[in-house]
Amino acid sequence: MKNVTIIGAGNMGGALIKAISRSKSYKVLVYDADSAKAKTFAGKNTVIMGSPHEACLQGDIIILAVKPNIVLNVLDDLKNDIKEKLVVTIAAGVTLKKYEETVKGIRIIRCMPNMPALVQEGMTTLCKGSNATGDDMKLALDLLSHAGETLVIDEKNMDGATALAGSSPAYVFMMVEAMADAGVLEGLKREDAYKLASQAVLGSAKMLLVTKEHPGELKDRICSPGGTTIEAVKVLEQEGFRNALIKAINVCADKSKKLSGESK
């Protein structure tokens, strides 16, 4: 059993704590300045640590789940405790180069998970630093597979992946809320409306993943000539549904680039 140290028990760190602690292959050592918050995510294989230094010294793999604006300072503070250990970071917009400049020789893997990791249905993208090995990447992939699906990408695509997968659950939650509001307007009970909308999203996503068919083709099958669905699709097009999503994802990616200092 390997010890996985997670520094930070915020929303995303907490989701990873819950996901990884379900595995019998890992013992999860958690440090957060707010120990009460860390305890809310604790499972059977979880130990709440009183010091980040002790947590890192005992860990085989270190996950930095702190905010982008402090992650480099935290790393610098812990550099003597993580020597020769694999470090995984989830901070948006902070490049591998910056980690490697902060700690020389660091074996670093940058990743971007998303909130559905909390229910083991997350999507995590990963890229490795210059000192990380292929075995390091295999270890990170196995570790994060407990939170859902994983995908290795080039770092140049990480900002786009952050906007598309890392942040997109927020867009989906907004859509489900709006769909449920419409159902309530039509007379449905609130809880029934949420269930109908949520299952529609879940089922639609599974169809795409299982059939691997183009989303446009699947949409066309539902749109009968002169029917109710095509009428709704017409309104979505008129109101700029697709354009709004494209713009939202683009500005999210731009924000990620600004955080990394690489925007033009």
Image: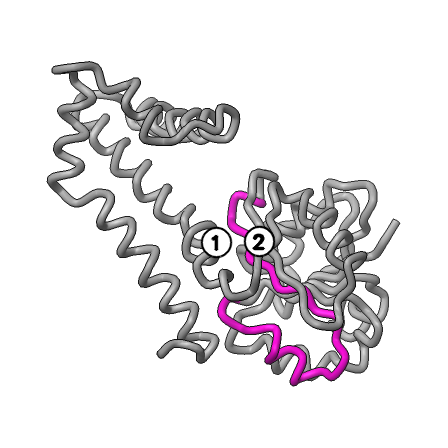
Q: Secondary structure at mark 1?
A: helix
- Res 65 → quadrant: bottom right
Please state if 76 lies on the left or on the right of 184 as rendered.
right
Left/right placement of residue 161 relative to residue 127 reads left
Asked whether residue 97 is drawn in magenta, I would say yes
- The total number of labels drawn is 2
Magenta span contains residue 1: no
Residue 226 horizontal side relative to residue 251, left or right = left
Q: Is the Cβ of the residue at disc 2 closer than 8 Å to that at disc 1?
A: yes
Instruction: Count neighbours of disc 2 (C-alpha within 10 A) and say few if under 14, some if 14 to 19, many if 20 or more.
Output: many
Is residue 7 in view from this perspective? no
Where 79 sits versus 124, above or below? below
Looking at the rendered structure, which numbered label has been put on residue 142?
Answer: none
Which colour assignment does the render follow?
one colour
Q: Position of residue 67 (x, y in %)?
A: 53, 70
Above or below for 76 versus 2 = below
The residue that disc 2 covers is: 125
Q: Is residue 200 left or right of residue 158?
A: left
**Residue depicted at x 20% and y 21%:** 229
- Local crowd at mark 1 within 10 Å, few (<14), some, or many (≥20)? many
Point out residue 205 in the picture as x, y percentages from the top left corner. 44, 31
Give the residue at mark 1: 166
Q: Residue at x 33, y 25 (%)?
A: 217
Q: Amino acid at mark 1?
A: Gly
Residue at 60% x, 80% y is 98
Which stretch is magenta? 92-117
Going by the numbered disc 2, the residue's amino acid type is Thr
How far is disc 2 from disc 1 in space, using C-alphas? 9 Å
Mark 2 vs 1, N-terminal side: 2
